[in-house]
Amino acid sequence: MAWWDRFFGKKAHLAQVLFQLYTKDGTRGAEVRARQDGKFYFVPLEHVGGTDWKVIPSQITTYASEQEAETAAVNSPWFLRGDRPQP
């Protein structure tokens, strides 16, 4: 991973996807991820067809637990109504 650090000029924060959440109609979703520093966050997703999902850029807010990140994701305007997040 040294090449990654040289490329970006600093240590990259790699994250692991813990689980994915989907709306009932299957058009929107969210990935809950854990960072190496023990913080959690979610990434909004949009269904683009078949099994393909596109990441919707948004501001990253970190949470103390995966449950907090999950609650924030399913209560976000994106997940509830499809309102695009602000990057």
Image (spheres, rainbow, N blue to C red):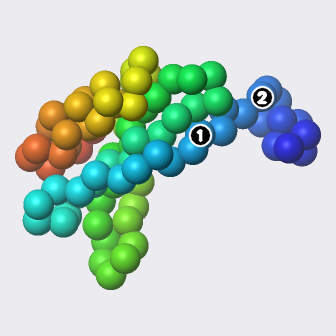
The residue located at (37%, 76%) in the rendering is 51
Q: Quadrant of residue 29?
A: bottom left
Q: Which residue is mark 2?
A: 11
Residues at marks 2 and 1, CA–CA distance in whole angstroms: 12 Å
Q: Quadrant of residue 43?
A: top left
The residue located at (39%, 31%) in the rendering is 66
Which labelled disc corresponds to residue 15? 1
Looking at the figure, which quarter contains the C terminus? top left
Is residue 67 shown left or right of residue 82? Answer: right
Check the image and report above or below for 68 versus 50.
above
Is residue 40 shown left or right of residue 13? Answer: left
Is residue 29 shown left or right of residue 75? Answer: right
Query: Given the current orientation, which residue lies at the most extreme bottom position?
Result: 50
Q: Nearer the viewer, mark 2 or mark 1?
A: 1
Looking at the figure, which quarter contains the N terminus? top right
In front of the other: 14 or 87? 14
The kind of residue tagged 1 is Ala
- Percent coordinates x, y for residue 22 in the rendering: 23, 57
